[in-house]
Every structure is written in C-alpha cells, then in structure tokens.
Amino acid sequence: MTFPPGFLWGAATAAHQVEGNNVNSDWWALEHAPETPVVEASGDACDSYHRWPEDMDLLADAGFTDYRFSIEWARIEPAPGEFLAGQLDHYRRMVDGAVERGLRPLVTLHHFTNPRWFASGGGWTSPDAAELFARYVEAVLPVIASDVDHVVTINEPNVLVMFARAHPDAVSEGLFAAHAAARDILRASVPGVNVGWSIACQNFYPEPGAEQVCEAFADTNEMRFVAASAEDDFVGVQAYTHTRVGVEDGRAMRTGVPDGCDVTQTGWEYYPDALGDAVRSTAAVAGVPIVVTENGIATSDDERRIGYTGTALAGLRRAMDDGVDVRGYFHWSLLDSYEWGRYDRTFGLVSVDRETFERKPKLSLRWLGPMGGRHGT
Ligand code: BGC
C-alpha cells in the first residue's frame, strides 16, 4: 500500500489518557467523586508528562513521521485567567522534541477534559464558554506559533454533546462557537496553519423500518458537526465501528450489537470497514480534505490489531482511489492508556507496565510504522 507525498503517518494520544496526575481537570474530579461511575482512577496514567521523549522516540524509530497529541487546558490554566508559563514551555518543548525527531506534531487543544473551574461554572453550557476557550487559545499561541501544521480545536464535539448530562443544545451551541472562535484566532495568528475539529464517525445504519428516522438521527449526532467543517481547512475522521439504529415509539435509537457478533474489548462490533465507510460519508458532506485522526481496536491480541488495521487501511486506500481526499492517518493509539474510566481496554501499539511505566513495543508498532513510507519528511 502506498500513500501520496506529504501524507501524514502517525499515532495519537490524548493528555489525560497518558500524562498522569491531571489533578485540576474535571475528569480527575469525576474519578474521585463519592459515587463515581468510573472503574478506576487515572493516577499516573503512562507518566508521559515526564516520559514523552521516550514515547516520541518509539514512534519515530518505528518509521512514523507524525504525532498527534493534546495539550491540557487544566494544567495551562488551572484557575480562571491564570496561565502558567512553565506549562506552556512544557508543551512547546514537546513540539520542539517532535520536530527534532522528524515527527510533525498535530496538536489537539481540547480532548474531553476541562479545567475544574470551567466545568463548575457550567462548562460548555455557560454563556461565556466560547469566550473562555478563545482566551485559552490566545494563551497557547506560543506553543503552536511555528512547526505545527495541523491543529484540532476540539476532539469529538458530537460525543461531548451525546454525553452531556444536561442541556445538550446549549453544549452544542457552546462548542460550535468555541470552534469558530478558535479557528479565527489561529488563522489570524499562525500563518499557514490548518485548522479543523475531529468527529466521532459512527457509521449509523438503519435496521429494517428505521430508514426514515436514521437520517435525522445521524444528522443530530454527527453530520451537522461534519457540515460545520466546510469552513475549516480539514476535518478529522475518527472511526472504529458501525452503529445500528432501530426505531421505538417512532424514535430512533441505537440497538446495540446483536448476539453472536464478533466484538472488541470495548464491546464494539468488529468492523474494520468502518474507516472506509466513514471517510466516504464524511467527504460527501464536508467538502474539505480529511485527516484520519483516530482509528484502531481495543484488543489484547496484537495479531487481531494487525488484521483489523490492515483491513481498515485497505478500505481507506480504496476510498482514496475512488477520489476521497485523505491527507493522513493517525492510529489510535500509540500507548495502552487510560480508557476513560479503566485500563483494561488496550488500544496501544506499545504496552505500558502499570507499575514501572516500562514501554514494550508490540509487533503492530513495527508492522505499521514503515508502511507510510516516510513521506514528506
Ligand atoms: C477518543 C479517545 C478514546 C477512543 C477509544 C475516541 O472516542 O477520542 O480518547 O480513547 O475513542 O475509545
């Protein structure tokens, strides 16, 4: 399989899932709440806050040319308006560290977690949410002022809306406004930067009888976020599986995975064609280039990871041959990391010992790394 010159070829992580000790975030608070729904707390995660050079070495040595990581708002602005220069320096060192290793950094500004003060002030439902996010984006400009070609403003806004505990419409409004504000600031301040957001592409498809309600359901939960990318420079596609939609009392609903289906550790249907399907449906709506910002599988069986990813990439390649404009692929994830409430669902190309933090590359890392062909570096 070959990819065009300049194609981004990397793996992805997110700050809260790998850094550890993200104590000022709303997720840390949730993990320690008296009746928390999470199975285990994130703790030290993979200690990547300190060990990021080792993570980047693994990636670059395996043949990848790109790294998607996120910067943590809760660390940078632990109290309203109080921006910590040391934390900004930390993330700038990561950008420089990536470049030194021949890795092009793709930086995500918001990956699910918020500073506690932002969450307790109403989070995305607050009338000044977009303004507060914009102030954070202004503050992080030094981190991305040079050497960063791609920025994801907000990871999976559609998932944030789906999981909103209250007022999903207000959450959605806040996210759209924050994304647009961030895009304007970045375009005005960082010449040549490509800005987008990354969407959870769920490949909704109707069970018999649900055809009519399915389209509106897909629009509410995904396509309106994709459509908003029309003004961006790219759209991030994140695809793992597909989602069956049924109908009950005239309303669309997810029907879950039928008995007997092959599932992964997350309980999602094993469906590697998710990636090809997702880039095709996204391209039809977005009208801007696509970067695959996440694709992968939770499994303890690394051969299954290789099988899944090989089939997913073949589907991606076919879509590209059919004219879909895809500019890059980031595997989720570089490391076995904190999977939002637990550690026993492993997406990594590299395993991490939970006590010593020793990294052990899996065969999949060595298999996938060279496949991109070191384009563009
Ligand atoms: C998220 C990641 C997550 C992955 C697997 C995506 O929705 O962006 O943070 O680990 O899916 O669940």
Image (cartoon, rainbow, N blue to C red):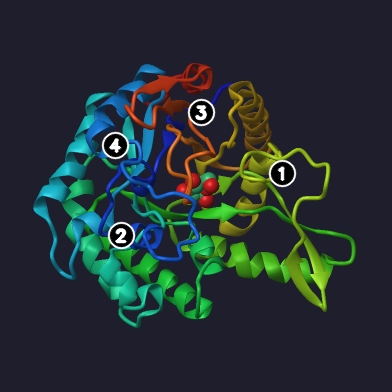
Which mark, by number, is residue 47?
4
Foreground residue, 142 or 195? 142
- Front position among marks 4 and 1: 4
- Where residue 72 appears, x then y in whole percent? 28, 52
Tell me the element at label 2: loop
Query: How far separated are the C-alphas under marks 1 and 3?
Result: 31 Å
Query: How far separated are the C-alphas under marks 2 and 3?
Result: 39 Å
- The residue located at (67%, 46%) in the rendering is 268
Residue bearing the label numbered 1: 269
Q: In which quarter of the image is residue 246?
A: bottom right
Foreground residue, 42 or 81? 42
- Where residue 102 appears, x then y in whole percent? 29, 25
Query: How far separated are the C-alphas under marks 1 and 2?
Result: 31 Å
Q: Which amino acid does label 3 sit on?
A: Pro
Tell me the element at label 1: loop
Which mark, by number, is residue 25?
2
Tell me the element at label 4: loop
Query: Does residue 101 appear left or right of residue 123 in this picture?
Result: left
Residue lying at the far front of the rendered structure: 34
Residue bearing the label numbered 3: 4
Disc nearer the start of the sequence (1/2): 2
Visible in this render: residue 290? no
Asked if the residues shown at circle 4 and circle 3 are in contact, with their CB atoms under 8 angstroms apart, the answer is no
Question: Within 10 Å of the Cα at label 1, are there few (<14), some (14-19), or many (20+) other Cα atoms?
Answer: some
- Front position among marks 2 and 3: 2
Q: Which amino acid does label 1 sit on?
A: Glu
Disc nearer the start of the sequence (1/3): 3
Disc nearer the start of the sequence (2/4): 2
Disc nearer the start of the sequence (4/1): 4
